[in-house]
Image (cartoon, grey):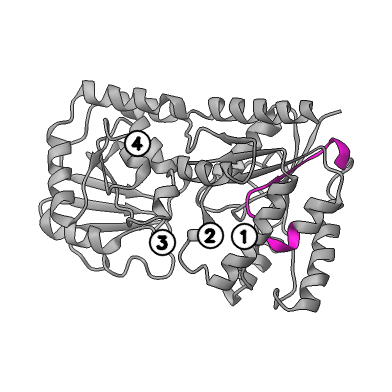
């Protein structure tokens, strides 16, 4: 009998970052039966959230970016607002437990995998006899912008209860591991961001493009320093700065109308490797701060796997790869770093970047996680 995983994601299905979906698809390939539960977060839903939920429910069978059916079921749970009202909160906790418990045939052989400690999830964590509870922390959400003091308190209390039941904890970055290690005895630093390295190998092996194109591929959100990119574009008037990715909360305002900035919007995952092939330098213009230092962006691995020179602000993940990444803070240093990185590029430098990306393969990540899960199951 195959083992079941009820995977509670920190992303909605179809989010531009498909890492959570890809990971569960690979566990499905190894014989696990997966129920992928879309995230509910911690805040009350906005009108936009409600409209998106309606669209998802109407869209029918979940599919991958290529249009093929995913190898698991996708569950879109529902809660009633206002979520912090005591009577509504109690009702939501019972309702969410029923919605998700019904998806699992035998919880005593099943794994509950939690990637966000949504408070209404706690009765499911504590009152169902799971074979194993896994807690995985990708981002240190408590430090994220917009997290109020009250919500942070709710988050901490909920996380503590998940940790008390977890048999294994996965951390995506060293700062997250350090924090969780003080709260749990079995914290595993999983290979952080990872990529399908073979997909980028052909890009790295191709002749280098002409200099003059600097590229960012990723979300334009609170992490992305649009003002920095705008100032860099003015200092590199002879360059084209290509920015590709979904925009949230008007994060692109500083870039709209700049003559040498191209805003491509959301791109499909399959478009990313050839897009990187047209870049002479790739960019990591993240805002500095405690939250950013807990991140390990997937795009950083993809840039290196494609062999491209990378210029980044001094977030911790980039500093850990400073032997192959140019670190520059401030518009003047960032612009100079782009020119210098492009001028110093060579076949040997591209090979060093590709080699540096090798530990971040999907196979290694799933091997590490599966081994830790099976060891925790064996310990009972």
Residue at mark 3: 221
Q: CA distance from mark 2 to mark 1?
A: 8 Å
Task: Tell whether 127 sits left or right of 371.
Answer: right
Q: CA distance from mark 1 to mark 4?
A: 28 Å
Residue 136 quadrant: top right
Q: Earlier in the sequence, mark 2 or mark 4?
A: 2
Q: Is residue 80 above or below residue 162?
A: below
Residue at mark 2: 142
Tell me if residue 205 is in the magenta stretch. Answer: no
Q: Residue at x 39, y 59 (%)?
A: 220
Q: Earlier in the sequence, mark 1 or mark 3?
A: 1
Residue 337 place in picture, x, y as percent: 16, 44
Any mark on residue 116, and which? none
**Disc 2 crowd, CA 10 A, few/some/many (<14, 14-19, 20+):** some
Residue at mark 1: 156
Q: In this rendering, which labeled residue sits more in front, label 3 or label 2?
A: 2
Residue 230 place in picture, x, y as percent: 21, 62
**Disc 3 crowd, CA 10 A, few/some/many (<14, 14-19, 20+):** some
Q: Earlier in the sequence, mark 3 or mark 2?
A: 2
Any mark on residue 320, and which? 4
| Secondary structure of the residue carrying numbered label 3 | loop
| Secondary structure of the residue carrying numbered label 4 | helix
């Amino acid at each position: 009998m195959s083992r079941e995983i009820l995977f509670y994601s920190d992303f909605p299905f179809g989010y531009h970052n498909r890492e959570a979906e890809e990971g569960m698809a690979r566990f499905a390939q190894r014989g696990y039966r997966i129920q992928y539960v879309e995230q509910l977060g911690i805040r009350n839903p906005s009108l936009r959230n409600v409209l998106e939920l309606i669209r998802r429910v109407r869209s029918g069978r979940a599919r991958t970016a290529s249009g093929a059916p995913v190898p698991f079921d996708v569950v879109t749970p529902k809660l009633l607002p206002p979520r912090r009202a005591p009577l509504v909160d109690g009702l939501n906790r019972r309702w969410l437990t029923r919605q998700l418990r019904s998806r699992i045939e035998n919880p005593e052989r099943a794994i509950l995998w939690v990637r966000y400690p949504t408070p209404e999830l706690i009765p499911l964590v504590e009152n169902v006899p799971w074979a194993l509870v896994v807690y995985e922390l990708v981002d240190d959400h408590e430090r994220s912008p917009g997290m109020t003091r009250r919500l942070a308190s709710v988050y901490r209390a909920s996380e503590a209860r998940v940790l008390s039941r977890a048999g294994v904890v996965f951390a995506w970055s060293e700062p997250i591991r350090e924090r969780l290690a003080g709260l749990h005895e079995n914290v595993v630093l999983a290979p952080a961001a990872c990529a399908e390295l073979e997909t980028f190998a052909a890009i790295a092996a191709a002749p280098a493009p002409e200099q003059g194109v600097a590229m960012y591929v990723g979300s334009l959100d609170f992490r992305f320093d649009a003002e920095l990119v705008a100032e860099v574009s003015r200092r590199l008037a002879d360059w084209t700065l290509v920015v590709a990715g979904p925009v949230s909360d008007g994060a692109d305002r500083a870039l709209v109308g700049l003559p040498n900035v191209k805003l491509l919007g959301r791109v499909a995952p399959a478009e990313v490797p050839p897009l990187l092939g047209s870049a002479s330098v790739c960019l990591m213009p993240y805002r500095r701060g405690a939250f950013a230092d807990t991140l390990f962006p997937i795009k950083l691995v993809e840039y290196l796997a494609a062999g491209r020179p990378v210029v980044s602000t001094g977030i911790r993940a980039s500093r850990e790869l400073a032997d192959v990444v140019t670190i520059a803070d401030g518009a003047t240093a960032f612009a100079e770093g782009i020119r210098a990185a492009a001028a110093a590029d060579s076949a040997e430098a591209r090979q060093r970047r590709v080699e540096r990306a090798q530990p971040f393969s999907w196979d290694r990540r799933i091997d590490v996680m599966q081994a830790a899960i099976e060891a925790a199951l064996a310990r009972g």
